[in-house]
């Protein structure tokens, strides 16, 4: 996260794990995470990440295997940050 609130990701990851809109396995240059959000906190892992926006919204991206993104999906790839569903 840079001072403007933009989030940048890079490195070797597949399945949209960088959140940049690409599913390419390697991104050597730092690329801004898609969506135009301003981020205040983020946690990333090998298959994706989650972050809190300046508006207080939680969004996740990457590989949704095993329902890891909190968006209700139990599979598939989400290469851009998607809203996490609230508890019911």
Image (cartoon, helix red, strand yellow):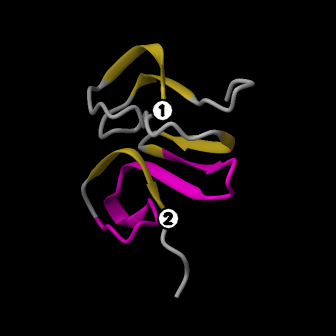
For disc 1, the marked residue is 33
Judge from the rendering whether residue 14 lies leftward or rightward of residue 68; answer left or right: left
Per the rendered image, the range of residues in magenta is 49-74
- 61 or 74: nearer the eye? 61
Judge from the rendering whether residue 39 lies leftward or rightward of residue 79; answer left or right: right
- In which quadrant of the rendered view does residue 8 lie? top right
Q: Position of residue 57 (x, y in %)?
A: 61, 59
- Residue shown at the point (52%, 54%) measured from the top left: 59
User: Is residue 64 found inside the magenta-colored segment of the image?
Assistant: yes
Mark 2 lies on a secondary structure that is loop
- In which quadrant of the rendered view does residue 79 lie? top left
Q: In what quadrant of the picture does the N terminus appear? A: top right
User: In the drawing, what numbered circle is on residue 84?
Assistant: 2
Q: Position of residue 37 (x, y in %)?
A: 56, 41
Which of the marked residues, 1 or 2, is nearer the chain's N terminus? 1
Q: Residue furthest top?
A: 29
């Amino acid at each position: 996260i840079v001072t403007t609130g933009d989030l940048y990701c890079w490195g070797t990851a597949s399945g949209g794990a960088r959140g940049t809109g690409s599913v390419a396995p390697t991104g050597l240059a730092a690329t801004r995470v898609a969506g135009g959000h301003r981020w205040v906190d983020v946690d990333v892992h090998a298959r994706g990440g989650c972050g809190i926006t300046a508006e207080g919204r939680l969004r996740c991206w990457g590989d949704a295997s095993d329902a890891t993104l909190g968006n209700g999906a139990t599979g598939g790839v989400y290469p851009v940050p998607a809203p996490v569903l609230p508890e019911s």
